[in-house]
Image (tube, rainbow, N blue to C red):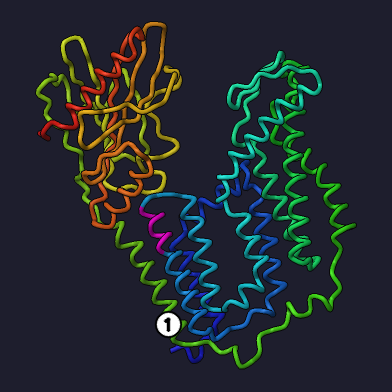
Amino acid sequence: MFKKISVQSLFTISLIILFAVNTLVLLTIFDEWNSDGPYSHGFLGIIVVVYVFYLQRHRLQATNLSKGHYSLALACLVFSLFVFLVALLSSIQQLQQLAFYSTLVSLFFCFYGWKMLRAFFIPLLMLLLIMPVWNMLQLPLRELSTQAGVWGPELLGIAVDRDHYRLSTAGGMFDVDPACSGLGFFMVAALLAFCVSYFNKLSTKRTLNFLIISLAIAIIANWLRVMIIIVVGTYTEMNHFIVHDHLTFGWIVFAVCLIPLIYIARTFFEERPEDESQELIQPETSDESSLNKKQASITLIVLITFVAASYWIPSRYDENYAFVEPSLDNYQLVSRDKPYSPSWKPYSQGATQERFSYYIDKSLGFQVYLADYYKQEQASEMIFVENYLFDEDFWTEIAEKKLAVPGSSSLSQANLVVLKRSAHRYRLVASWYVINETVTSDKKMAKLAEVKAALIGKPGATLVAVSFDFDGENQAMAEQQLSEFIDTYLNSNQS
């Protein structure tokens, strides 16, 4: 079958299949690259990566993998595709992006072998550095930048009060948002370090040394940006342009900090002599250059099987899915399945339908909000960053915690948000998720239940939220009354 087909052609076919299946994933990556966020260097980075691959094209050579190496490569491919399938079914964007990269590397491993994977380690690592999968670094970098925003101005005699990530001085208030963490500088510095390592043919030890220096300079550059903005904003009472256009100012500071980094690279990390790196560019011997037809067949079959599964599994759903509300004996139903509420405006993007019901018990009133999804997809799901349970223009969040539901066997606690609108108007909003009879308030468990439900062809899910207004005098009593209503709601028979 593959007698006249080269390994490059088969690898190209595999890439075309992989890219076609991951079109939406690629679009999310391009969106991150096209934004003002920490991955805005992506388009420039991919040009560098492609150029490095082009320079090393003569080293690409098919390898007849040993059984041990191919078993490892195939295991990596199967695992990557499995993670991709789970990420697809659970609509976790960054996990999909990471699985896409892992699958790409695994395919490279399957077709070209371990030696080629090692030879192309630097460009593959550079590709990983421009993937938008590094958000977990924002938290520690943000913490360091916030602390630097306290220490720096105080060294100049400016008193700074810190409230989480909000810094207050006599001249104004400064929020150290996730975008101010310096993650963009951090990733650009890492990419630059490996570029220098590749073009200067640095050893592993010297590469790590230069990487540490580059990352340190990137962190210091962001500290300087934060400190300068706070100092200038304080003395100008927030009227200087760098306070408002801190993004452009930050890149200017980073560019200035690159000057000593470039000097260090040219002075202390010069190119290695050619003979030291000669071993690294020797091609494979000719007796190992033939492609094993069986290995190629298995690789393509595994890829196509998972591709088929990624289309077939999500295609099974009930278009008529809707959560059936229970019939409550102790509460009077005033209205049910109303598409709109005049006093409550939550938002669930991509919901199949949104419904409101209202229950009363003597002087107590409880409003129930249901957001049904007959299936969930990326950006059309219960757990999504743009969804909200209250309008921030009318309500201020006081606290976010868990509400115990001791009488329920299906739900031990619900998510609770405490809101305030005026001195005598407060609101409690409790919420949880229902996925194929699984009831939970935990987002991770909801995602796991989402995957299980999709696998058995019943992906229907509903966000359930209950609001209860009170005067703010006795919050503990209000929480107890809300908990009792939820307990009754969960334990009643469905009508």
Q: Quadrant location of residue 195? A: bottom right
Above or below for 165 versus 342: below
Closest to the observer: 161 or 227?
161
Q: Is residue 117 left or right of residue 462?
A: right
Residue at left 29%, top 53%?
452
Which residue is labeled 1 in the image?
297
Above or below for 18 versus 184: below
Q: Is residue 164 left or right of residue 199?
A: left
- Magenta residues, as a range? 82-89
Q: Is residue 292 left or right of residue 202?
A: left
Viewport quadrant of the C terminus: top left
Closest to the observer: 356 or 224?
224
Q: Secondary structure at mark 1?
A: helix
Q: Residue furthest front?
A: 406
Q: Give the x, y percent position of residue 363.
A: 20, 9
280 in the magenta segment:
no
Residue at left 32%, top 15%?
476
For label 1, count other residues whose C-alpha is less than 10 Å away and answer few (under 14), some (14-19) or many (20+): some
Q: Is residue 490 left or right of residue 207?
A: left
Viewport quadrant of the N terminus: bottom left
Q: Amino acid at mark 1?
A: Ser
Q: Quadrant location of residue 389? A: top left
Q: Give the x, y percent position of residue 314.
A: 31, 56
Residue at left 64%, top 39%?
141
Closest to the observer: 421 or 197?
197
